[in-house]
Image: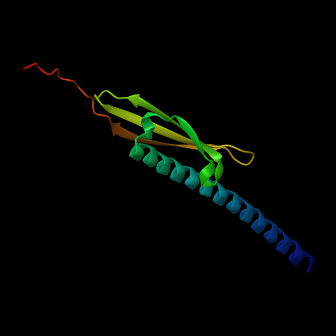
Amino acid sequence: VLVATVLVGLAVSTLMGGLAQFTNIYGRSLERETLFRLADEKLDELVGTGEWATLSEGDFVGERYADYSWTLESETTSIEGLELVRLTVTKSGPARHGSQTAETLVYRPTTTTVPLEAP
């Protein structure tokens, strides 16, 4: 009986350790998914509204994600009028730290002015 009790105790402690590890992995997976989703949604919003050209950083406090913030940078490419826009979402706070980056290309047409000839 004593040996059976010890074996059951070992099995239960092993299962509890596995459950704790699974919970930790699941939490990190949810956090990573949140980072991906926030980065994609914010980049789509900024490109769709044209604010990518004027804003460079912000947060998600109004969207119930107080521990998350974003930064935006753009760089020109070798193709005229085409810019690479990169948005990075970062999680800060006491629990976990992480970041995720989303990128897209945005075409900003160049305007050329042609002088009008006087009649």
Residue 35 drawn above or below residue 6: above
Left or right: 100 in relation to 50:
right
State the residue in front, 106 or 95. Answer: 106
Residue name at image x 42 percent, y 34 percent: 53
Q: Residue furthest right?
A: 2
Left or right: 117 in relation to 79:
left
Q: Residue furthest left?
A: 119
Residue 74 drawn above or below residue 91: above
Residue 44 x/y as whole percent: 43, 48
Image quadrant assignment for residue 7:
bottom right
Picture quarter with the N terminus? bottom right
Residue 4 drawn above or below residue 83: below
Residue name at image x 72 percent, y 44 percent: 93
State the residue in front, 52 or 29. Answer: 52
Residue 105 x/y as whole percent: 36, 39
Image quadrant assignment for residue 115:
top left
Left or right: 106 in relation to 113:
right
State the residue in front, 72 or 112. Answer: 112
State the residue in front, 115 or 42. Answer: 115
Left or right: 43 in relation to 10:
left
Residue name at image x 45 percent, y 48 percent: 45
